[in-house]
Amino acid sequence: MTRATCVFIFCLLATSFSWTIALDVTDPSRRLTFGQLLTGSLALQRQANLPASQVTKQTDASLAIKPYEETLAKAFPRAMTYSSLARRVSKLVPPTISRASPSTPKVLLATSLCCDEVNRGLEQEFGAYYGDCFSMGGLAGFPFSGVTGFQAMQSHIPNDGSALIVYGPHVGIDEHGTLGQLQRAGQGGVATPCCGSAAAAAKYVMQPQQPAFNSGETHGAAKPTAAFTGLDMEQSQVNSLLLSHKDALSRAADPTLELPYILFNIQNTMLRQIVQVAGSNAPLALLGGIQINTPIGASDYFLPLVFDAGGTGGRRFSKSMLEGLYDLQ
């Protein structure tokens, strides 16, 4: 090895060391290795062969915050990806009896999520840990299977096991950062309401007059609609349940942001009433929050709002695991 070669290698190593110190020696995740420095220098070399304007565009594109990410950070700053959520929950609610019996199921997964196909990803993510789920949800995420559905779910819980119930409404953010909208696959990039059921209910509620749901009479409507005939029972119930919160929705600074929170509070109360009436013969864990659907190809998110354990024998849910969920990595 020549003297010139030795000097060159020494300079590179010295540069690597000094750059590592300059970044943050207390944070290993932010340190650059010698290999990374060489990789970076090769990238710079490739950029050197490009026009300056093209290099700038590539750099700006890689560093720019996408519009949906900006809306997500402002509206739901504590939301986490589906994968992160499922992994954390599995640590607090182990899916199997023990490490010695990894194939023996301990927890039955149940969900009360909206029928919308964009929401199935959350069930799939949890399914990787807990297996197939028992679905109790209907439009907008309401537990429309009711007491009968809950009792059926309980009868499927493994012996000496428990149930994990994941529930809540959802809302979309499209690629332009618009809350309450979402582009769907195969529709040419056109954004539509998400959640559609929630948006329809909000539109209904904010009308000056609404049709009556419990009779053939109408108030401001020409004739009874499908809601009265039983052909649209779930949506009629979503409308009716939201109607009592009309004032809160109309006073909200951002009704589109307020809507999923209002729906969650209604669903949370409804589910706990179902548990109380049905009775619980096994331990339960209730994980409730808001699903956030993002543009095609991006990770979807969930904002946990409650994570309670208990309920055996009709007892109240006295243990909250919510902060523990956020503290986990």
Image (spheres, grey):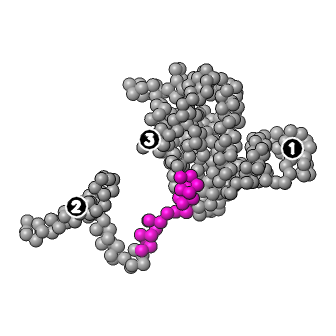
- Give the vertical position of 2 relative to 155 (above or below): below
Q: Secondary structure at mark 1?
A: loop
- Residue located at (73% from left, 49% from top): 248
Question: What's the distance in space between the residues labelled 3 and 1, CA to CA?
Answer: 48 Å
* Relative side of 98 to 306, left or right: left
Question: What's the distance in space between the residues labelled 2 and 3, CA to CA?
Answer: 33 Å
Q: Earlier in the sequence, mark 3 or mark 1?
A: 1
Residue 68 magenta-drawn?
A: yes
Q: Which residue does the numbered mark 2 point to in the structure image?
A: 17
Q: Which residue does the numbered mark 1 point to in the structure image?
A: 212
Camera sees residue 178: yes
Camera sees residue 175: no
Q: Secondary structure at mark 2?
A: helix
Quadrant of the image for the C terminus? top left
Q: Earlier in the sequence, mark 2 or mark 3?
A: 2
Q: Which residue does the numbered mark 3 point to in the structure image?
A: 328
Q: Secondary structure at mark 3?
A: loop
- Residue located at (63% from left, 48% from top): 170
